[in-house]
Amino acid sequence: MLILMLICVFLILCLLYGMYASARSVARGAGHIRSHVTPNSAAVAPAETDLCAPLPKFHACYQSRIEELRSLFALYQSGALTQAEFEQTKRHLLAKMTALS
């Protein structure tokens, strides 16, 4: 009985460590993606260049939200976020922008 209990504790600890290690790996990968995502990168198609240009007509708080949306979309395109996570976070950011106006 004691051996069975020790095996269960060991398995639980292995599971927790695996979750911790995978969360760190995802965070590290997302940070790596964020550090390489720039609005005016060479990989941007010429038709998208206007979308990535700064928008001076918006207030500074809108600029930061727009940059967050761009970063969020880049994470979604890279596969770091699921569609549900992307949609939920996008709605949250858009709601903040609406509250500011």
Image (tube, grey):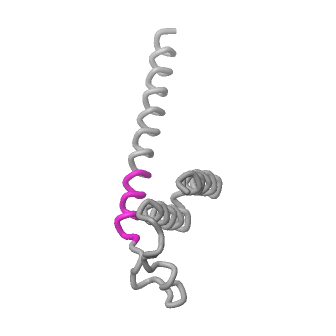
Residue at the (43%, 28%) spot, across then down? 13
Q: Is residue 89 left or right of residue 63?
A: right
* Quadrant into which the C terminus falls: bottom right
In the rendered structure, does residue 59 fall within the stretch colored magenta? no
In this rendering, the answer to whether 42 lies above or below 22 is below
Q: Which residues are magenta?
A: 26-37
Identify which residue is drawn at 41% across, 35% down: 17
Task: Pinpoint residue 92: horizontal percent, then vertical percent.
Answer: 58, 51
Percent coordinates x, y for residue 93 in the rendering: 55, 54
In this picture, residue 42 sits left or right of residue 98: left
Given residues 96 and 40, the one toward you in this image is: 96
Residue 95 location (% of width, % of height): 60, 52
* Number of marks: 0
Q: Position of residue 51 (x, y in %)?
A: 51, 79
From the image, give the main secondary structure of the stretch colored magenta: helix
Which residue is farthest top?
1
